[in-house]
Amino acid sequence: MAELMDLLSHLGDSLQQLFGLLTMAGSRFTNNLGESFSSVSLKQWIRLVTVVGAYLLIRPYVLKHATTRQQAQLEKEHEADEAARAEIQPNHLRGQIDIPEDSDDEEVAEGAATATNWGGKARKRQRQFVKKLLDAEEQRLADLQEDEEDKDIEQYLVG
């Protein structure tokens, strides 16, 4: 019980010191702010008003220029995306699936070095599985095509 009382008294002392520190910081801030405004000369006031006025006059033009540049950049990116989507390659028409390359090493080199590489082995297994499926499908299609060619040749030989 005595330890609890000591802990509470220590907590009270700490809060009192924190409050004293905050009041001291507040009084120093108000004193320094008041002194900084009262000790400014006429030349410094004129300079301050000139700088603030110039900022207020130039700011809308700078924002307008930045907006037009950003809009032009976004339109350029949008056109590039549209052009990339508009390209139809023969493999897309045939339904060929793109296989992602083994890029685990590149990802680590590009900046993911600090993060853990969760699921790297699973992605590699998935890529290998997709490659095996595509190879099997290509083999099946090649066999089917050979069978059809054999039937065409057989038709000419028999007939």
Image (spheres, rainbow, N blue to C red):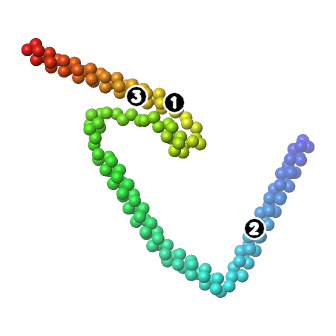
Residue at 49%, 77% (x, y): give it: 57
Mark linked to residue 158: none
For the residues marked 2 and 3, what is the alpha-carbon distance in whole angstroms?
A: 67 Å
Element carrying mark 1: helix
In this rendering, position of residue 52 left or right of residue 138? right
Dot 1 amino acid type: Lys
Picture quadrant where residue 36 is located:
bottom right
Q: Position of residue 79 (x, y in %)?
A: 33, 54
Picture quadrant where residue 21 is located:
bottom right
Residue at 77%, 70% (x, y): give it: 27
For the residues marked 2 and 1, what is the alpha-carbon distance in whole angstroms?
A: 58 Å
- Ranked by sequence position, the earlier of labels 2 and 3 is 2
- Ranked by sequence position, the earlier of labels 3 and 1 is 1
Dot 3 amino acid type: Val
Q: Which residue is mark 1?
A: 121
Residue at 42%, 35% (x, y): give it: 101
Quadrant where the N terminus lies? top right
Q: Which residue is mark 3?
A: 130
For the residues marked 3 and 1, what is the alpha-carbon distance in whole angstroms?
A: 14 Å
In this rendering, position of residue 159 left or right of residue 49? left
Q: Are marks 2 and 1 in contact (CB under 8 Å)?
A: no
How many neighbours does mark 2 have within 10 angstroms: few (below 14), some (14-19), or many (20 or more)? few
Q: Are marks 3 and 1 in contact (CB under 8 Å)?
A: no
Mark linked to residue 26: 2
How many neighbours does mark 1 have within 10 angstroms: few (below 14), some (14-19), or many (20 or more)? few
